Every structure is written in C-alpha cells, then in structure tokens.
Amino acid sequence: MIVQTKAERRERDALQGCHWTISLLKRWLIGTHAGAVRDKHLQAYLDEFAFRHNRRKTKGVGRIAARVIEQARRAPAAADAKADRRHAALPMARVNSGPGGLS
C-alpha cells in the first residue's frame, strides 16, 4: 500500500484540475452574480470566466493589451467599409445658396 499526502494525491489525480475549475466557476457565478444567472446570458458568463481563468497567471498583461490593440488596428478595414455603405445610403443635405442655407 502506498501512502500519499493530500498534495501528492491532488497532483496525480487527472480529474482534480477539472474539479477545481468547476468549483471556481460555481463560486464565481454565485459570488459575482449573486446566483442570478439566467440561461439567456449563461454563454457570456462562461466566456468571461474562461477568459479570466486562462489569464489568471499571466504576467505579461502589457503584451496581451498590445496584441489586442494591434488586432484592432488591423481590423478596421472591414468595419470602415460597412460604415461607408451605411453612410452612402443616407440622404445628403444639399447646400442652397439662397437665404435658408440648406434645402
């Protein structure tokens, strides 16, 4: 018979990480959202938890921010094209040289 400490058993248990993560998720949902979690928003809550959980040990927060900014800087081409199409559909005011100014 092999005697293990709790720490050794935890380290060797393949499912222990899953148990800890689910426990953290439950505590986070109950603590942060006071148990008022609805099906409609559950996916957004799970996405936020996964984002925070995956970055809990990251020391390079500045690098993450720099990457996000860089991606945002590259992405506007599609957003600008969409905005241009929306603005093109709006009626343009014509400038009248008469006393009213706009017509």
Image: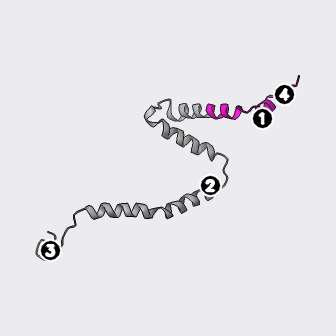
Q: Residue furthest left?
A: 99
What colour scheme was applied to this rendering of the protein? one colour
Query: Magenta segment: does it hold 17?
Result: yes
The answer to which quarter of the image holds residue 38 is top left
Q: Which residue is mark 2?
A: 61
Coordinates of residue 91 in the picture (x, y in percent): 22, 63
Give the residue displayed 20% in from the left and 67% down from the top: 93
Q: Are marks 4 and 3 in contact (CB under 8 Å)?
A: no
Label 4 vs label 3: CA separation?
A: 88 Å
Quadrant of image for the N terminus? top right
Label 3 vs label 1: CA separation?
A: 79 Å
Give the residue displayed 67% in from the left and 53% down from the top: 59
Label 1 vs label 2: CA separation?
A: 28 Å
Q: Are marks 3 and 1 in contact (CB under 8 Å)?
A: no
Amino acid type at mark 4: Gln
**Tag 1 or tag 3, which sits nearer the N-term?**
1
Q: Which residue is mark 4?
A: 4
Q: Horizontally, is 75 left or right of 100 in the view?
A: right
Which is closer to the viewer, label 4 or label 2? Answer: 4
Foreground: 1 or 68?
1
The relative height of residue 37 versus residue 66 in the rendered view (above or below) is: above
Query: Magenta segment: does it hold 46?
Result: no
Magenta portion: prevailing SS class: helix
Q: Which residues are magenta?
A: 1-23
**Tag 2 or tag 1, which sits nearer the N-term?**
1
Coordinates of residue 26 in the picture (x, y in percent): 58, 31
The answer to which quarter of the image holds residue 13 is top right
**Tag 3 or tag 4, which sits nearer the N-term?**
4
Amino acid type at mark 3: Asn
The relative height of residue 52 versus residue 96 in the rendered view (above or below) is: above
